[in-house]
């Protein structure tokens, strides 16, 4: 609040009357109160940045699996094997080098890359996870037409990505693999709406097959 203090001028007795002098004093107390109220309002209503993390699914440790129990079956699975600037993959439920799998074939590492071509990771994942991507388009249409709300869309999409026919991905690396390639691969898997992504230790058989592939 502003207060005006009047000071007496001269002019006692005869002669000309002097103009009265006035001084202005601004009371800043209300302004300070307002500043604190605004600060409190913005603190309570602001959304702070959350730490960005990569949600990954870690499988159970070997000692946690009961003796004699078979490993869980993985339908529509793909395994990526990374080494330095190389990225390979093989499809199938389990690695099999000496003993043929149920289809009568042994595991073969196929080279891929992060390029936009037909042999690139993005095109590959788009084909293998077509089941989820097609159904996601239906959910996108419902959300656009406001037939479902955001929370329902997110929950249905998360359930869709872990269904039996959805693609599941395992990532294995040797001691020369680059962290950049690992992160780039996870990004591509997220773009392709792959819901199950699990980093797993590479097996001796896979490591031997990888070394043989790198020598070529």
Image (spheres, rainbow, N blue to C red):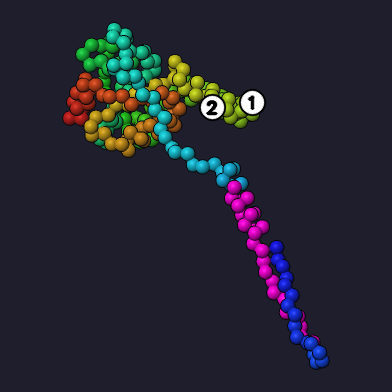
- What is the spatial separation of the Cα atoms under label 2 and label 1, in whole angstroms? 14 Å
Task: Identify the magenta region.
Answer: 17-40
Horizontal arrangement in the rendering, residue 162 relative to residue 169 (left or right): right
Residue at the far right: name it: 14
Residue 19 belongs to magenta span: yes
Q: Earlier in the sequence, mark 2 or mark 1?
A: 1
Q: What residue is pinned by disc 2?
A: 154
Residue 71 vertical position relative to residue 14 in the rendered view, above or below: above
Residue beneath the point at 58% across and 29% down:
150
- Measured as percent of width and height from the top left, residue 2 is found at 70, 66
Horizontal arrangement in the rendering, residue 188 relative to residue 152 (left or right): left
- Measured as percent of width and height from the top left, residue 169 is found at 37, 23
Would you identify the image quadrant in which residue 19 lies?
bottom right
* SS label for mark 1: loop
Q: What residue is pinned by disc 1?
A: 147
Badge number at residue 171: none
Residue at the far front: name it: 13
* SS label for mark 2: helix
Asked whether 7 or 85 is in front, the reply is: 7
Horizontal arrangement in the rendering, residue 71 relative to residue 15 (left or right): left
Residue beneath the point at 67% across and 66% down:
26
- Measured as percent of width and height from the top left, residue 109 is found at 27, 23
């Amino acid at each position: 609040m502003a207060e005006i203090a009047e000071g007496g001028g001269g002019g006692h007795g005869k002669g000309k009357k002097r103009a009265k002098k006035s001084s202005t004093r601004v009371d800043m107390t209300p302004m300070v109160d307002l500043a604190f109220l605004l600060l409190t309002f913005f603190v309570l209503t602001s959304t702070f940045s959350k730490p960005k993390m990569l949600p990954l699914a870690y499988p159970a440790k070997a000692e946690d699996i009961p003796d004699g129990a078979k490993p869980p079956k993985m339908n529509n699975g793909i395994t990526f094997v990374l080494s330095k600037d190389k990225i390979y993959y093989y499809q199938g439920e389990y690695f099999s080098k000496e003993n043929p799998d149920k289809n009568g074939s042994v595991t073969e590492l196929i080279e891929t890359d992060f390029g936009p071509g037909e042999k690139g990771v993005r095109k590959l994942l788009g084909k293998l996870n077509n089941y989820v991507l097609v159904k996601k388009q239906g959910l996108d249409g419902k959300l656009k037409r406001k037939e479902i709300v955001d929370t329902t869309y997110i929950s249905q999409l998360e359930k869709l990505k872990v269904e039996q026919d959805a693609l599941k991905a395992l990532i294995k690396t040797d001691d020369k693999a680059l962290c950049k390639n690992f992160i780039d691969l996870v990004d591509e898997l997220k773009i392709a709406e792959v819901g199950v992504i699990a980093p797993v230790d590479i097996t001796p058989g896979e490591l031997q097959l990888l070394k043989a592939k790198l020598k070529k």
